[in-house]
Image (cartoon, rainbow, N blue to C red):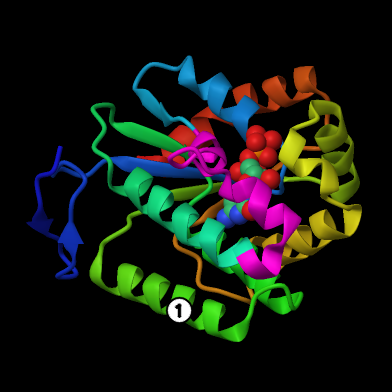
Amino acid sequence: GTETAIGTAGKLVRNGGDKKAVICIEGNIASGKTTCLEYFSKTSNIEVLTEPVSKWRNVRGHNPLALMYQDPKRWGITLQTYVQLTMLDRHLSSVSAPVRMMERSIFSAKYIFVENLFRSGKMPEVDFAVLSEWFDWITTNISIPVDLIVYLQTSPQTCYERLKQRCREEEKVIPLEYLESIHHLYEDWLIKQTSFPLPAPVLVIPADHDLQNMLHQYEENRDKILAGSC
Ligand code: DCP
């Protein structure tokens, strides 16, 4: 839907009108977010938004994800501008179910990935400034409600092993150090809570375990996740 309304904070609300609970699944690359979303997609009353990564790999025949990994200085801004757009689109899309679950958020795109590119010297300051202006404008003028963040907490080593196993072509160049940087940014944001504002309370789920164990944990946390969000 494209209905618009002015929300309580005076911001433009464009998510179909009435309030729906929003849960964002956060975690490092290959931390198991997709598995978590798939698990909850089988629950009634929850609508799971599919990951936009397929878009990042193909925008009108171009692959900005691959380009960014090949030459982050040149293409980082290209990918991250598009990530920001696709995330905004996800946040604003209207859902019919009372609970919506999505992979990552516009917040982690900025606070984790853009921040990482900039801090590691892989994004020119002017690119960072322009992206930040966009982000600040969006978050000031558009209401992006999040009710709960579920943080799949992993060790970078576990993610590295899962990454090698899944063998996504674009990601073959990712070294362990990259996952370590992302990990530390996540920990500072969601655990230490010293870096950037939290858009919602955080539920931490240890996620180094094997698939069977993880599914068990999702089952155990199901009520907490759904209660925290309603
Ligand atoms: N990515 C990025 N910048 C962002 C978001 C993601 O560069 N702002 C990259 C990291 C990955 C790819 O996009 O190479 C997909 O990232 P995700 O971690 O979102 O998806 P995964 O499929 O890795 O998640 P999981 O394995 O946890 O299901």
Say if the magenta span includes residue 72.
yes
Amino acid at pointer 1:
Val
Q: x and y percent of residue 170 in the render?
A: 73, 41
**Ligand 1 quarter of the rendering:** top right
Q: In terms of image quadrants, where is residue 11?
A: bottom left
Residue drawn at 41 percent across, 71 percent down: 135
In the image, which residues are magenta?
51-74
Q: Is residue 130 left or right of residue 145?
A: right
Q: x and y percent of residue 82 in the render?
A: 46, 54
Q: Is residue 151 left or right of residue 10?
A: right
Q: Is residue 204 visible?
A: no
Say if the magenta span includes residue 105.
no
Residue drawn at 82 percent across, 58 percent down: 178
Q: Is residue 3 left or right of residue 175?
A: left
Q: Is residue 185 visible?
A: yes
Q: x and y percent of residue 111 in the render?
A: 57, 67
Considering every residue shown, the one lying at the far front of the view is 61
Work out which quarter of the rendered image holds the C terminus and state it: top left
Work out which quarter of the rendered image holds the N terminus and state it: top left
Residue annotated with mark 1: 130
Residue drawn at 64 percent across, 25 percent down: 35
